[in-house]
Image (spheres, grey):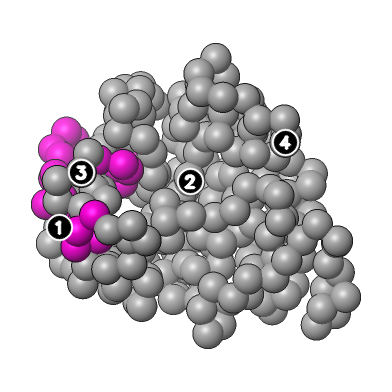
Amino acid sequence: MTDGVFLYDNERIDRVDEKISLIQKKDGFAYGTDAVMLAAYIRKTSKKTAVEFGSGTGIISLLCEEYNKLGKIYSVEVQNGYFDLLKRNIELNNSKIQPINADIRSLTPKDFGGEVDVVFTNPPYMKTDSGYSNNDLGKNTARHEVEGGIEDFCKAASKILKHGGLFYCVYRPDRAIDLICAMRKYNIEPKRMTYVYPYVDGRSCLMLVEGKKGALSSLYLTKPFIIFKSATEKNTDNTDDMNRVYRECDMDDEFKRV
């Protein structure tokens, strides 16, 4: 037991910042830069109702709550083991996030008292027949489209979003076309996109996208987001933009215009 929250032998508690502590599995899927960057990419709309798809430990929802980026937040997780972890992280942080144990494909607006304003997700980015399969089911499901592909995520988001509602996603650049096509197929128009690079001369490692349900076509491609000033062995020389992500869970206005 830690602060009244049960901790299993294969788990640890990591300090994310001054306010958030996070229970993570020692040998399981841990949050990374992609999760932190997605939270920072989400616009601050503190009175809006939002839903996270595939919450895992709950880190993105917890960051959004801490920095008052959204109003009421529902966190949806299909894996029973990670749903239990999500609930304990909510309890550990005295959070008001509402956890839901469900397959996103089964969700309807009734689950949230009506259509919602925002959906955000860090979905599995590898097809089931690509990459290396992991013996750990949690890791494998987090990385591979075992519980639904990107079309399923976009379809589920469109089903519960209001007209004009926002969809946020962090994804792999090599699957950009899959993401964009899926968004358009389900009436979510890509409106803002940012490619993330480890350093200036590196190849893009992530992409961040904001879409709007029912919007007209017009995409704002931001300047590149650079994580490190240069390629170093330990990669500790964060750019000012990356330091702001960690410090404020936010980005410069150049990354927000549409």
N-term mark: 1 or 2: 2
Q: Nearer the viewer, residue 33 or 249?
A: 33
Amino acid identity at mark 2: Thr
Q: Position of residue 34 (x, y in %)?
A: 42, 51
N-term mark: 3 or 2: 2
Q: Decide: few, some or many residues near mark 4? Use Cα within 10 Å; few <14, some 14-19, many ≥20.
A: few
Q: Are marks 4 and 1 in contact (CB under 8 Å)?
A: no
Labels 3, 4: front one: 3
Q: Position of residue 118 (x, y in %)?
A: 43, 52
Structural distance between the alpha carbons of marks 3 and 4: 30 Å
Labels 1, 3: front one: 3
Structural distance between the alpha carbons of marks 1 and 3: 25 Å
Q: Nearer the viewer, residue 121 or 15?
A: 15
Residue marked by disc 3: 202
Residue marked by disc 2: 121
Residue 257: assigned label: 1
Amino acid identity at mark 1: Arg
Residue 136: assigned label: 4
Question: Is 211 positioned to the left or the right of 193 in the image?
Answer: right
Q: Are marks 3 and 4 in contact (CB under 8 Å)?
A: no
Q: Position of residue 75 (x, y in %)?
A: 62, 54
At numbered mark 2, what does the secondary structure look like: helix, strand or loop?
strand
Which residue corresponds to the image point at 43% horizontal and 60% vertical from the top-left? 36
